[in-house]
Image (cartoon, helix red, strand yellow):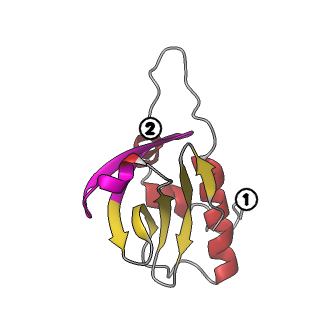
């Protein structure tokens, strides 16, 4: 859902009944095409660096995937899953804020401290969240 062009590739969120993942679909001549399935690749997005796993499907070809939610029990319905996916994409494409005293930090690192990435995105699901 919501795939956006990023450099030569496309980035979006895949929602299934079992999981939600950030997906990178390589464009023509992308460096990701040559990766073997299961290998890790960092992808620099506007908000920071994300770790993806390389995968391949015959019908689709090579792509990169980064798990956001699995299983999907936290979502009451598809509408809520789509809202969270849209919020994830908004955060992923928001430029990182750099402070003059500190080097830029990747989003994956920011999401791990003090809260896990699941906790960060899970906060979008909590009742009372103004963005919920």
| Secondary structure at numbered mark 1 | loop
Residue lying furthest right: 130
Left or right: residue 128 versus residue 32 is right
Residue 59 in sight here: yes
Residue plotted at (47% across, 66% down):
21
SS at badge 2: loop
Asked if residue 112 is among those painted magenta in the image, a careful observer would answer: no
Q: Quadrant of the C terminus?
A: bottom right
Which of these two is toward me, 41 or 92? 41
x 50%, y 82%: residue: 73
Which residue is painted at 56% across and 55% down in the image? 10
1 sits left or right of 122 in the view: right
Residue 113 can be seen, yes or no: no
Rendered view: 12 above or below 71: above
Identify the residue position indicated by label 2 in the image: 106
Q: Which residue is mark 1?
A: 131
Task: Specify few, some or many for label 2: CA neighbours under 10 Å numbering under 14, 14-19, or 20 or more.
Answer: some
Q: Cα distance, mark 2 to mark 1?
A: 23 Å
Q: Which of the two residues, 84 or 16, is positioned nearer the viewer here?
A: 16
Quadrant holding the N terminus: bottom right
Total marks drawn?
2
> Of callouts 2 and 1, which one flags the residue occurring earlier in the amino acid sequence?
2
Residue 87: horizontal and vertical position, in percent? Answer: 65, 58
Residue 12 image-quadrant placement: bottom right
Which residues are the magenta region?
A: 32-53
Q: Residue 62 vs residue 2: left or right?
A: left
Establish if 98 lies above or below 28.
above
Q: Nearer the viewer, residue 123 or 82?
A: 82
Q: Nearer the viewer, residue 62 or 95?
A: 62
């Amino acid at each position: 859902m919501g795939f956006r062009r990023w450099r030569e590739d496309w980035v979006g969120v895949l929602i299934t009944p079992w999981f939600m993942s950030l997906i990178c679909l390589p464009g023509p001549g992308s460096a990701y095409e040559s990766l073997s399935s299961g290998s890790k690749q960092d992808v620099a997005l506007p908000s920071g660096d994300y770790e993806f796993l390389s995968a391949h499907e015959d019908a689709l070809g090579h792509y990169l995937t980064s798990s956001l939610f699995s299983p999907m029990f936290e979502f009451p319905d598809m509408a809520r899953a789509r809202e969270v996916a849209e919020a994830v994409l908004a955060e992923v494409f928001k430029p990182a804020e750099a402070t003059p005293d500190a080097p830029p930090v990747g989003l994956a690192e920011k999401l791990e401290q003090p809260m896990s990435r699941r906790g960060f995105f899970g906060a979008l699901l909590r009742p009372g969240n103004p963005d919920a």
